[in-house]
Amino acid sequence: MKSNDILKDLKPARVWHWFGEIMQIPRPSKHEERISAWLVQWGNDHGLETMSDKLGNVLIRKPASKGYEKSPWVALQAHMDMVCEKNSDKKFDFMTDAIQPVLDGEWLTADGTTLGADDGIGVATILAILEDAKLQHPALEALITVDEETGLTGANGLSKSWLKSEILLNFDDEDEGEYCIGCAGGIDTVADMDYKLVAAPVGHKAFKLKVSGLKGGHSGDDINRGRANANKLINRILWEATYRHGMRLATIDGGNLRNAIAREAEAVVTVPEEKVRAFKAMVTRMGKAMVFEFRSTEPDMEFELRDVEMPKKVVDKDAHERLVNLVYACAHGVLAMSREIDNFVETSTNLASIKMKNGAFHIATSQRSSVESAKMAAAAKLESTFRLAGCRVKHSDGYPGWTPNPDSRVLKVGVDVYKKMYGREPIVRAIHAGLECGLIGEKYPSMDMISYGPTLRGVHSPDERIEIKTVEMFWNQTLEILRRLK
């Protein structure tokens, strides 16, 4: 069944229509060629001034409606890429397959994969605004960027002379009833540790250990929710088995994306036959202990241990031991809370993934902070841990935070609109996640910006879902904000 068949009765109809169309187009981060070309064609088909840059960012301009010709230009901004996560038992190719939406009561989710409402619903809302000739608004620029999720490279490469707008509405927030006016900056720290493969020891039995069923989630928004990291959990067992049961490591694979908390991890190990009984008892004991430890935040956590065919090779003992010690020592989670804002995460780090490739363990982490010096200190903390384990370390270029402006004109308009439409005061806050507003503000320092959107939950995981009624609230709110920016 095509997406729009499921979405046809949802309101506002045109927003859901375009979201359904977007779900048909594969758009993993760094592979946005098809959605970028589709957006350019869409703009041209609608007779709007449309352009794209060498990165694939798309800009579509719509003239002001009657009476708004002298109003400042307004940019509507969202990103076209999506996080591609799926359940391990789901057969799905994000490079070729369409997202399969599922209605679940008051929510829309997907069948075993991320939904892509982050930020497909923002793009769909922009298209619905651009195509509606009856709306009242200033001259509009739709800025739809590439690769927000894995490096913000679209916003980072944005030309300083492309935009005419003085105001920007970013549609990448995930909580209806709030306006975001600031965000954390971020940087990635990755390490490579060489290993050698040696003959598997004689007299051992092989097992596959797997941790699954975790919630995962966004490494910024969800880092303080007490959720477990599959890489850290599996390593607790691997470390114990290494030093207490003579275990040898054959393979390990944990986590995926740098901005997602690791949901699953697995390892193939070998254990001396005389230690097998004690090893199995230890896995059962530690698994039950961790299930109890995270009982309130990870109710679906599972540990699985099963016999597998004996591998011909295992990792050399030195690299194996350095890895399990490194992962135990590697920081993960909240590093500091804000001293100025109650219950606001200032600095954090995410142990995102552990992979084996070309004779090296590849360990990816990401650090976030609303304080630039604290961000760099967190990155140095990770680098020092990696160097102690003999790793080669690299940092990404990073991206800046977005400094809040509580005196923002568009914020005041938004707050007034929300109070009059819904009879309550909206929340105004900064977030620990990264937003493109920081990079856009660096290139356009006088840009007046806010970020808001409908309610999403479980983003960056197959549990991603969007609350249907909040999309209409977001739509009506946006139209009224545009009408008042005269």
Image (cartoon, rainbow, N blue to C red):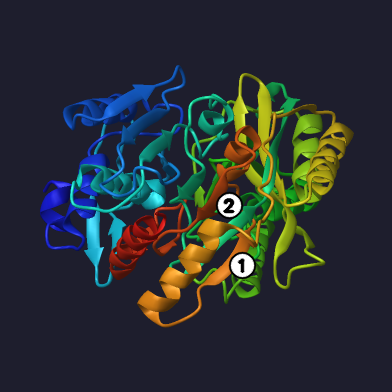
Where residue 330 appears, as percent x and y from the top left, is 78, 47
Q: Is residue 196 above or below residue 87?
A: above
Is 387 or 321 nearer to us in this picture? 387
Is 79 or 7 nearer to us in this picture? 79
Task: Please tell me whether mark 2 sits on a helix, a strand or a loop.
Answer: loop
At horizontal 71% and vertical 21% (from top left) the residue drawn is: 196
Q: Confirm whether residue 1 shows in the render.
A: yes
Outermost residue toward the bottom in this view: 423
For label 1, the crowd category at 10 Å Cα-Cα, with few meaning under 14, some 14 to 19 and many 20 or more, is few
> Is residue 366 left or right of 140 when viewed as pictured?
right
Is 406 or 317 nearer to us in this picture? 406
At horizontal 62% and vertical 44% (from top left) the residue drawn is: 352
The residue that mark 1 highlights is: 225
Where residue 350 appears, as percent x and y from the top left, is 67, 49
At horizontal 81% and vertical 41% (from top left) the residue drawn is: 376
Q: Which mark is residue 261?
A: 2
Amino acid carrying label 1: it is: Arg
Where residue 158 appears, as percent x and y from the top left, is 53, 27
Q: Confirm whether residue 99 shows in the render.
A: no
Which quarter shows the C terminus? bottom left
Is 166 or 282 nearer to us in this picture? 166
Residue 482 image-quadrant placement: bottom left
